[in-house]
Image (spheres, rainbow, N blue to C red):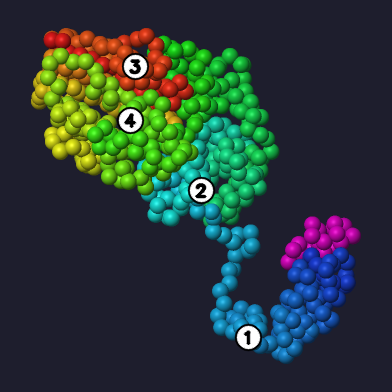
């Protein structure tokens, strides 16, 4: 016989898997008739475990009808002995208790029954809710330019995902976004095609699977099977097979091996440390270079770059602020639970263990406390403590949205008998500011208004004693908290933002009175947005007839946090790897004429 496994074997035969009429000719599982049948009764061939009929399957001893499956003895019956076209017939012709497709049911189980027409490999099952939530976050971030930290929490609440499942979904979504560059470099070695040719939903699922395999403590079989099930449910059976093959390839090597491979691919000559770090630590190369320049420009060692990038990839702990005069830190600490600790630097800060969920704390619900990075607290406290000459009655937050710093300043102003004006250019963000300052002491908030901050200096020249400019920036100092930001920003963003920052700082310097203080703040350490922006803005102010001096920001911060490690410079730059905060920048300026 020329065909393998006989004329009716699986690879050979004339009819392949669909049994023909001759015994064994194309029969995968024919009877003891002609050549090669398997699992037979006594018939000739047929794929479906045939009996004696031509094409019959699992027949007993009858002559089997043509095309019959599992034929027995009844003609047309099901499980019949010898019926033609019999399917599981009873002993009589036509059988009993059959549904519309000819399937028999026991007499005790009558009535309609739902069946799927899909093959087993194409049937969908319900995927894990936590993984589905993470997948939906990635798709929303990609399709709508949304922020993951704004999408995920309400989605978890809406779907009733809580506790450990919520923590799993959070780490899966945020961790995948942070390490997207690393995983893309790994996946590109496993897909057999450029990632640009992979459908975006499938690519997002592959990234989620890679993070489970290489970045979380998920058993490999669970990471692969759950991701495949997710893709089968959300996309289809064909892509699920592709995902299965790719993730199995990823799972064959540990993370350390993959990091060496993608590092070597990015830096084949071994001479481009920035390219290697960018691939291994999952930052765009231009961001890595900008952060290296920022470290050196702010007085730190370039050798810290690896630690900084690694810190960007760690999930930050949740920091709370006890707003002075409204909430007591010790009370907030007690309410936050036994694992909560006092903040490392700010006297107003409480740190939650393991992320924690602050929404249930009474003080947070009441607005007397809030969620705020400790670095953000420090720069607001520094403005309030900076030395000025003269009155201290009217404060301005020039770019106040979404309101965290404004709420802290309002609480401080209330303690001192001062009033705060909060300005925000975007109406929806101004609404968030109003919500944030709602618990402020009576009279502490003069106004929350919508307006262009660049116009305030001309509209109210010299109208304020203290001005906070928390300038719009690239956010490259808060990458651990905004995981998608590193993949959205481009070098061209810098030119637009730095022009806006200079204009806003010029407005702030005109809005503050002589003897008053301006705090220039960004959540980016990039030199173009920090030191260089200040140099340009103060030079322009002097040309316009204003005199400005730079105050000793590290000295002011040391008065708040004595152990804070800062180089001896006029401005202050915080770092996630050194201070555990976002990379907040602070320059304090006092107008002298």
User: Are circles 2 and 3 on residues that touch, CB within 8 Å?
Assistant: no
In percent of width and height, residue 376 lies at 33, 28
Q: Nearer the viewer, mark 1 or mark 3?
A: 3
Q: Is residue 133 magenta?
A: no
Numbered disc 1: secondary structure: loop
In percent of width and height, residue 323 lies at 28, 34
Residue matched to label 3: 558
Residue matched to label 4: 348
Q: Which mark is residue 164?
A: 2
What residue is rendered at 20% in x and 14% in y?
590
User: Are circles 1 and 2 on residues that touch, CB within 8 Å?
Assistant: no
Residue matched to label 1: 108
Q: Is residue 7 magenta?
A: yes
Q: Magenta stretch: give its range.
A: 1-20
Residue 141, placed above or below residue 130? above
* Observer-nearest of 321 and 105: 321
User: Are circles 4 and 3 on residues that touch, CB within 8 Å?
Assistant: no
């Amino acid at each position: 016989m020329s065909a393998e496994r006989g004329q009716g074997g699986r690879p050979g035969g004339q009819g392949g898997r669909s049994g023909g009429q001759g015994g064994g000719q194309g029969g995968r599982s024919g009877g003891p008739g002609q050549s090669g049948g398997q699992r037979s009764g006594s018939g000739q061939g047929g794929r479906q475990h045939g009996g004696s009929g031509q094409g019959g399957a699992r027949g007993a001893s009858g002559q089997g009808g043509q095309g019959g499956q599992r034929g027995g003895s009844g003609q047309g019956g099901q499980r019949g002995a010898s019926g033609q076209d019999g399917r599981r017939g009873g002993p009589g012709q036509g059988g009993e208790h059959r549904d519309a497709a000819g399937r028999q049911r026991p007499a005790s189980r009558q009535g309609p029954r739902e069946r799927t027409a899909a093959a087993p490999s194409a049937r969908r099952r319900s995927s894990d809710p936590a993984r589905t939530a993470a997948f939906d976050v990635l798709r929303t971030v990609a399709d709508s330019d949304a922020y993951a930290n704004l999408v995920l929490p309400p989605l978890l609440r809406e779907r009733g995902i809580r506790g450990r499942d919520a923590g799993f979904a959070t780490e899966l979504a945020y961790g995948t976004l942070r390490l997207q560059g690393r995983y893309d470099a790994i996946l590109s070695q496993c897909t057999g095609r450029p990632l640009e040719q992979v459908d975006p939903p499938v690519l997002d699922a592959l990234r989620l699977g890679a993070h489970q395999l290489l970045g979380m403590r998920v058993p490999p079989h669970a990471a692969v099977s759950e991701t495949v099930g997710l893709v089968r449910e959300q996309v289809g059976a064909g892509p699920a097979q592709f995902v299965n093959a790719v993730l199995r390839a990823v799972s064959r090597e540990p993370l350390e091996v993959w990091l060496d491979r993608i590092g070597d691919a990015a830096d084949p000559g071994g001479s481009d440390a920035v390219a290697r770090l960018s691939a291994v630590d999952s930052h765009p190369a231009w961001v890595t270079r900008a952060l290296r320049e920022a470290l050196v420009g702010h007085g730190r060692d370039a050798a810290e770059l690896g630690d900084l990038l690694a810190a960007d990839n760690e999930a930050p702990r949740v920091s709370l602020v006890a707003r002075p005069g409204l909430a007591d830190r010790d009370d907030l600490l007690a309410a936050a639970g036994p694992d909560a600790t006092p903040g490392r630097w700010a006297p107003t800060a409480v740190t939650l263990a393991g992320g924690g969920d602050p929404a249930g704390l009474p003080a947070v619900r009441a607005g007397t406390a809030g969620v705020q990075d400790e670095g953000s607290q420090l720069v607001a406290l520094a403005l309030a403590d900076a030395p000025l000459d003269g009155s201290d009655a009217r404060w301005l937050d020039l770019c106040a949205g979404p309101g965290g710093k404004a709420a802290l300043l309002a609480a401080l102003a209330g303690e001192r008998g001062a009033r705060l004006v909060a300005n925000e250019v975007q109406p929806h963000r101004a609404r968030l500011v109003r919500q944030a300052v709602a618990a402020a002491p009576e009279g502490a908030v003069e106004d929350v208004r919508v307006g262009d901050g660049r116009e305030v200096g001309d509209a109210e020249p010299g109208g304020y004693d203290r001005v906070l400019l928390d300038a719009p920036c690239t956010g490259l100092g808060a990458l651990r908290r905004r995981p998608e930001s590193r993949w959205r920003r481009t070098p061209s963003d810098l030119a637009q933002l730095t022009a806006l920052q200079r204009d806003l700082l010029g407005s702030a310097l005109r809005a503050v009175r002589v003897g008053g203080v301006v705090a220039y703040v960004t959540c980016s350490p990039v030199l173009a947005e920090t030191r260089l922006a200040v140099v340009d803005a103060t030079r322009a102010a002097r040309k316009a007839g204003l005199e400005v001096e730079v105050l000793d920001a590290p000295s002011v911060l040391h008065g708040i946090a004595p152990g804070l490690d800062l180089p001896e410079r006029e401005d202050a730059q915080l770092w996630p790897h050194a201070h555990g905060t976002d990379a907040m920048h602070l320059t304090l300026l006092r107008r002298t004429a």
